[in-house]
Amino acid sequence: MSHDTLRRPCPVRSAGPAPAAAARRRRHWTRRPNRLAGLGSVLWLAVVIVPIYAMITTSLTRQDEALGKNALTPPADPTLENYGTVLDNGFGHFLLNTALAAAAVVAIVLVLCVPLSYVAVRTRGFWSGAAFRLFLLGVAIPAQAVVIPLYLMIAKLNLYDSLLAVVLPTAAFAMPVSVLILTGTLRDISEEMYEAMALDGASPTRMLFQLVIPMAKGGISTVVVYAALQAWNGFLFPLIFTQSDGPRVLTLGLFNYVSQFGVNIPALLASVVLSGIPIFAVYLVARRALVGGLMGVGGK
């Protein structure tokens, strides 16, 4: 055997077709329709849409016609009289009280929960962790179990029958879940960012306002929507802690259409439709940040 034959390189098979075939298989897998998921989505959409459709169609129906009418049947003679009845019975006053209560609850929750979550994430001590776990026990405490002690506290503070009597307990019960959401969001912020700001001489307060809050917009948006919903849909605290029409909110305003002799169903549903429009508008504005915060990627 010659020396040139020994130095001749052995032929190597090209590995080109194998990765291409694998890529085609992956594309085929990703393009395969998930019929089960599609069917589940359609069923869930029907569960959500059908009650909303029935509510809107009934709100456009006259009261005498609504009593013997199928809720899914469109009204024969649509009318807006029910919405006029709602607006003439103090709906604007109830809407203003509810909006003020929701804004106050959101402000209290953000002012207290954002720094608290920041301390819980950045402090590694035993006592801070124990305090954080103790604070989260509020998630397991139902409001119905402590409504009597809360009533006594509200009465002692001379806050009964005021809007503040609704705001403070609602904010307190919204804080544990809000802290849980925010801590999950803040943990997504990389340690290198904190170290870089520390090397620049940034104080913890500066880190909070210049790093944490801008990077946690998803979690903060989730907390805003959650706290606003707790105040907007709250019924127990307004029912127990208020009595007169002054601090009455939308959930209690629905009782105006319930009497001893019957229920004005079209006007009641018209009030529900009007009360749901503002919170639906807030959801449309913050839906992307809300989904991101719930998925735990708000800080990325």
Image: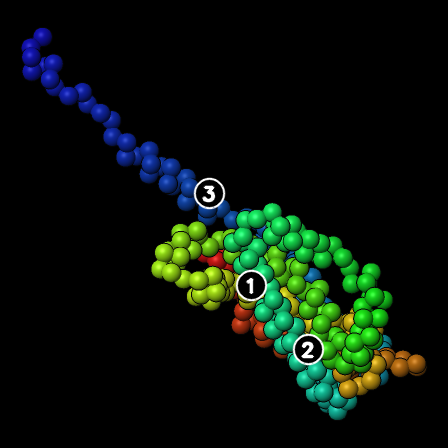
Residue 61 in sight here: no
For the point 63% across and 76% down, the residue is 103
User: Tags 3 and 1 in contact by the CB under 8 Å rule?
Assistant: no
Q: Earlier in the sequence, mark 3 or mark 2?
A: 3
User: Tags 3 and 2 in contact by the CB under 8 Å rule?
Assistant: no
Q: Nearest to the eye among marks 3 and 2: give it.
A: 2
Q: Earlier in the sequence, mark 3 or mark 1?
A: 3
SS at circle 3: helix
Q: Which residue is mark 1?
A: 115
> Label for residue 264?
none
Query: Image quarter for residue 116?
Result: bottom right
Is 262 left, or right, of 219 in this rendering? Answer: right
In the foreground, 50 or 111: 111
In the foreground, 217 or 161: 161
Residue 92 in sight here: yes
For the point 59% across and 68% down, the residue is 110
For the point 58% across and 75% down, the residue is 281
Q: Which residue is mark 2?
A: 101
Other-residue count near label 1 (Cα within 10 Å), few / some / many at <14 / 14–19 / ≥20: some
Q: CA distance from mark 2 to mark 1?
A: 22 Å
Give the residue furthest to the top: 1
SS at circle 1: helix
Q: Quadrant of the N terminus?
A: top left
Q: At which x and y percent is residue 164?
A: 73, 78
Other-residue count near label 3 (Cα within 10 Å), few / some / many at <14 / 14–19 / ≥20: few
Q: At which x and y percent is residue 238?
A: 78, 75
- Kind of residue indicated by mark 3: Trp
In the foreground, 168 or 265: 168
> Label for residue 29?
3
- Kind of residue indicated by mark 1: Pro
